[in-house]
Amino acid sequence: MKKILFFDATNQWILAEAYHFNSNEELQLIASYSGIHPRESSQRLIQELQNLLKEANWKTPDLIASALGPGSFTGLRIAVATARNLAQLWRIPALGFDSLNVYTSHYFQEVGDPVVVAIEAKQKKIYFGMEDRRGFFGSIDVKPDDILERIPEDRLQAYLTSQKYSDNPEFFSGNPIFEELPSSSAILNQNLSQVKEALEFPDRFPYWKLVPNYVRGTYVDEKSTV
């Protein structure tokens, strides 16, 4: 029985989940935490991970999986630095996933229809991701009015009929993400072969390969969308 620790602090929430990966190569969720903590990830992430390990009755996991962004500039640095530091300290492999892919995978699994996730990105833009039966499309740093120009023609119908999720529905209309925070179950199950490889060949997945997915090269004041 292998132990997998996932966490995400790249946006306004903290997600932390502990899984067993059993002999049948199935994931079993044994402990989880999710909460909304804007601008608090530096104080709360380690605390919540400690609580999760205690609840799971683990000293250390066998694999770390972390969201890498896009998202808050500070959140990305904290999430990736924490994943790298813990993987190095515990001498275990580390996997990283696009944050929007984590979210779209969850909502797509929940509703079974095309989904769009929009994270407010300041500068009157969003970080945009979409998932349908063909898989994930994103991550894009884009103004909402320019989305149609960025989507391939063969996926426009999926976008137009998609269920939309947003962390700021007043800026980009959609179901509020805060009312149903995502889980990592879908993205991990989509990547079971990679999970298995990381557990069997940990040297192929060193901590230093985790890199923040900034998407945008420069950032501005995060206090407004202007």
Image (cartoon, helix red, strand yellow):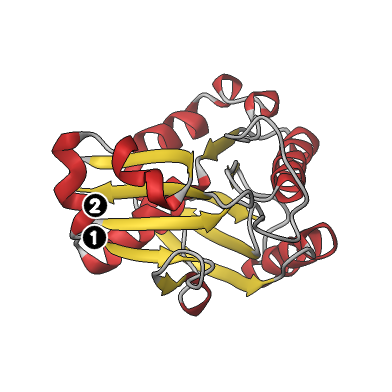
C-beta proximity under 8 Å, tags 1 and 2: yes
Q: Is residue 76 left or right of residue 165?
A: right
Q: In the image, is residue 50 above or below residue 121? A: below
Q: Dividing the picture into quarters, in which one does residue 85 lie?
A: top right
Q: Nearer the viewer, residue 46 or 116?
A: 116
Q: What label does residue 162 carry, if any?
A: 1
Q: Residue 193 at what x, y percent from top left?
A: 35, 34
Residue 28 drawn at (x, y percent): 42, 61
In the rendered structure, the answer to whether residue 95 lies left or right of residue 211 reads left
Residue drawn at point x = 63 percent, y = 57 percent = 11
The three-letter code of the residue at mark 1 reads Ser
> Which residue corresponds to the image point at 52% horizontal and 56% vertical from the top-left?
119
Which residue is at the front of the view, 205 or 167? 167
Which residue corresponds to mark 2?
Answer: 159
How far separated are the C-alphas under marks 1 and 2?
5 Å
* Dot 1: element: loop
